[in-house]
């Protein structure tokens, strides 16, 4: 083979190698790159969402102070028909917002002839509703003579009077029964000690004051059902009461912490103060 021929073949081999390398590089660049699918971030469940219900009113107690557009303090120390031994005030040491929760605090201090002070908050003339689900997440206090309550009264109480206006006690506890809460209705012919209701205890018989629990009713025209932590423990219908069924009109909400009375008895040497009723939220729903 001549020198010229050898050089020409070498140049041809070099050119073929360069072309193949170029094609290989182009092929690598053009190859599609797998991109994982982009998933949208999960949608946060709205505060107060409950399947099958529409939220109509709520207080999450997230503001710096009790919302006066939603709540009114009832003031007084006349015993409230129960021989209670506290004077209800609007003072900031008896009711306030702390860490996003409402605190109603009973204190051993004299006021207007009463040995204790506390608070009673109501939504009268600010919110009332007929039927629906009324619920609150609450940690109750403890001790002999201590009486926390989350309840409803008929909006027409000023004209119809009690008990004709009706009363629905969603949750009551008396301190000498730390492991029991009560749900009751009071109406004409079945009020006071003759109220119609039932009690509930936790599966492990733990004191309710040890933790927060959700207390609720679901109220329909012909039935009221009571729940603790979504456990149904009682249902009352018109057939269960000895008088008129007066639960067919709007009711307003009450939260209070009583001290003493005919039912719970009075504080003794074992009762410690202050005692607190702590409310994480109150929510009201209606069927859509």
Image (cartoon, rainbow, N blue to C red):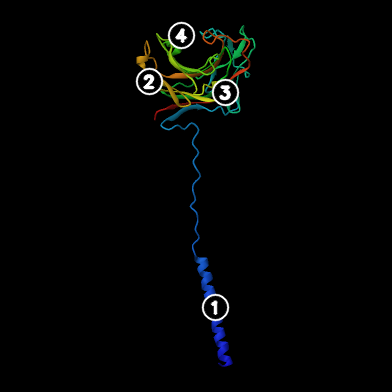
Q: Which mark is residue 210?
A: 3
Mark nearer the viewer, 2 or 4: 4
Tell me what residue is drawn at x 36 percent, y 16 percent: 238
Question: Looking at the picture, does residue 3 appear above or below residue 148?
Answer: below
- Cα gap from disc 2 to disc 4, whole angstroms: 21 Å
Q: Which callout, 2 or 1, points at the residue further toward the start of the chain?
A: 1
Tell me what residue is drawn at x 48 percent, y 31 percent: 48
Callouts 1 and 3 close, C-beta under 8 Å: no
Using the rendered image of the protein, determine whether residue 167 is visible from the camera's viewpoint. no
Question: Residue 147's spot in the image, x, y percent?
Answer: 54, 14
Question: Residue 160's spot in the image, x, y percent?
Answer: 42, 11
Q: Residue 223 carries which label?
A: 2
Q: Which residue lies furthest to the right in this view?
A: 109
Q: Quadrant of the N terminus?
A: bottom right
Q: Which residue lies furthest to the front in this view?
A: 204
Callouts 2 and 4 close, C-beta under 8 Å: no
Question: Looking at the picture, does residue 191 appear above or below residue 22?
Answer: above
Between 127 and 79, the one nearer to me in the picture: 79
Residue 266 falls in image quadrant: top right
Secondary structure under tag 1 reads helix
Callouts 2 and 3 close, C-beta under 8 Å: no
Callouts 2 and 1 close, C-beta under 8 Å: no
Q: Which callout, 1 or 3, points at the residue further toward the start of the chain?
A: 1
Mark nearer the viewer, 2 or 1: 1
Mark nearer the viewer, 2 or 3: 3
Q: Residue 17 carries which label?
A: 1
- Mark 4 crowd level (few <14, some 14–19, many ≥20, 10 Å Cα): few
Secondary structure under tag 2 reads strand
Residue named by callout 4: 193
Question: Residue 66's spot in the image, x, y percent?
Answer: 57, 23
């Amino acid at each position: 083979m001549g020198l010229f021929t050898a050089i020409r073949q070498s140049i041809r081999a070099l050119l073929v190698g360069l072309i193949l390398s170029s094609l290989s590089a182009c092929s690598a660049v053009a190859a599609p790159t797998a991109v994982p699918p982009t998933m949208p971030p999960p949608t946060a469940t709205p505060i107060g969402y409950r399947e099958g219900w529409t939220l109509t009113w709520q207080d999450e107690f997230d503001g710096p102070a009790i919302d006066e557009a939603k709540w009114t303090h009832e003031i007084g120390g006349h015993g409230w028909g129960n021989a209670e031994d506290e004077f209800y005030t609007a003072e900031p040491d008896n009711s306030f917002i702390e860490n996003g929760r409402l605190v109603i605090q009973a204190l051993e201090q004299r006021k207007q002839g009463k040995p204790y002070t506390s608070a009673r908050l109501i939504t009268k003339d600010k919110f009332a509703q007929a039927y629906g689900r009324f619920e609150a997440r609450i940690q109750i206090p403890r001790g002999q003579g201590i009486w926390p309550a989350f309840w409803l009264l008929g909006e027409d109480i000023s004209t119809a009077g009690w008990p004709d206006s009706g009363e629905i006690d969603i949750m009551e506890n008396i301190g000498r029964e730390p492991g029991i809460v009560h749900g009751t209705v009071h109406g004409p012919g079945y009020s006071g000690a003759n109220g119609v209701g039932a009690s509930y205890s936790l599966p492990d018989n733990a004191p309710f004051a040890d933790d927060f629990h959700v207390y609720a009713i679901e109220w329909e025209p012909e039935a009221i059902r009571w729940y603790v932590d979504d456990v149904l423990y009682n249902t009352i219908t018109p057939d269960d009461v000895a008088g008129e069924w007066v639960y067919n009109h709007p009711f307003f909400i009450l939260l209070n912490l009583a001290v003493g009375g005919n039912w719970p008895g009075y504080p003794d040497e074992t009762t410690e103060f202050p005692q607190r009723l702590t409310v994480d939220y109150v929510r009201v729903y209606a069927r859509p």
